[in-house]
Image (spheres, rainbow, N blue to C red):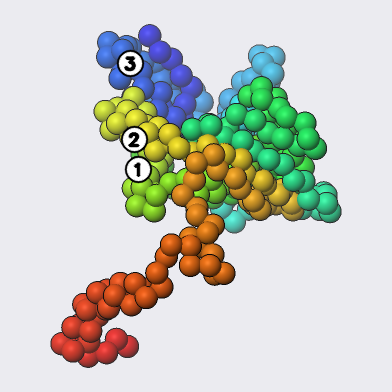
Amino acid sequence: LISHGATGKGNDQVRFELSGYALYPEITVIAPWRIQEFCERFQGRDDLLAYAKANGIEVEATPKAPWSMDANFMHISYESGVLEDPAHIAPDDLYKMTRGASEWPDKPTVIDVEFSRGIPVAVIKDKKRIEDPVAMLELLNRIGGENGVGRIDIVENRFVGLKSRGVYETPGVKILFEAHLDLELVCLDREVLRVKSYISDRMADFVYNGFWFSPEGTYSRQCLQMSQENVSGTVTMEIFKGTARPIGRRAVRGLYNEELVSMNVHGGYTPASAGGFIEIHSIRLKEYSKAFGMYK
């Protein structure tokens, strides 16, 4: 038996139940927001807030701050209430993890993020190395939060067909995301990057729509895990005024060949070979121009 309080208009009901059925097909689901008697008793959040107040149930939402908030160690998401108007600017007191622009420090913070096979294993700040995963994310959340990194305010497309407005805070993971993406550019082959990017986009859809425990979700995760076998190294990140950007990187085994790419030495590359490369790729362009005229 699984019971959840997800709204009948949202994605969470789909995620909870599809995951449950995939893991245990015989489950029974109780979803109050899909029960007629419940919906007749409670039309929406205002009725729920009144019920909570009348029965001494403590909740963070109030009539003055009626938005919903789902929080964990990695992020906070906000929706509903005043946020249902996509033109309404989210109030400053909504945010719990990140500071507004007027509070950002005037000095950048520089850290190193170390990865092993695509997994962050250490954060180095002021020569202090932190390897405990909880301590790492706590530090990144604090640094990112102080600099307003990881705030997102978007209108998204729910799987059930509705558009919704969501506000999110993910400071620490945003730093890790940018660092990891940068290291991949050094360690992964160009064509692997393209395929991996496509699979990543599809995997995001699977997660968002509740298909983590699906054949396609399992297959995609295995592909992504394989792509990370050589993604090991360290990325230097600068966190400053709402941004987290890589400013240096060192791969354990990367594809970047400084001698080969240098403009000061040939490094085993024969510039004359580029002529034939260009000639071959120009054939179809020449033939198209002859047949249909020049591009406008």
Displayed quadrant of residue 78: top right
CB atoms of marks 1 and 2 within 8 Å? yes
Query: Judging from the image, what secondary structure is the residue with disc 2 in?
Result: helix
In the displayed structure image, the side of residue 116 where residue 276 appears, left or right: left
Q: Which residue is mark 2?
A: 223
Say which of 128 and 22 sits in front. Answer: 128
Pointer 1 or 2: first along the chain: 1
Dot 1 or dot 3: first in sequence order is 3
Q: Is residue 175 left or right of residue 266?
A: right
Front: mark 1 or 2: 2
> Closer to the camera, 265 or 132?
265
Location of residue 132 (image quadrant): top right
| Residue, disc 3 | 23
Report the number of discs: 3
| Three-letter code for the amino acid on which mark 1 is drawn | Ile
SS class, disc 1 = helix
SS at badge 3: helix
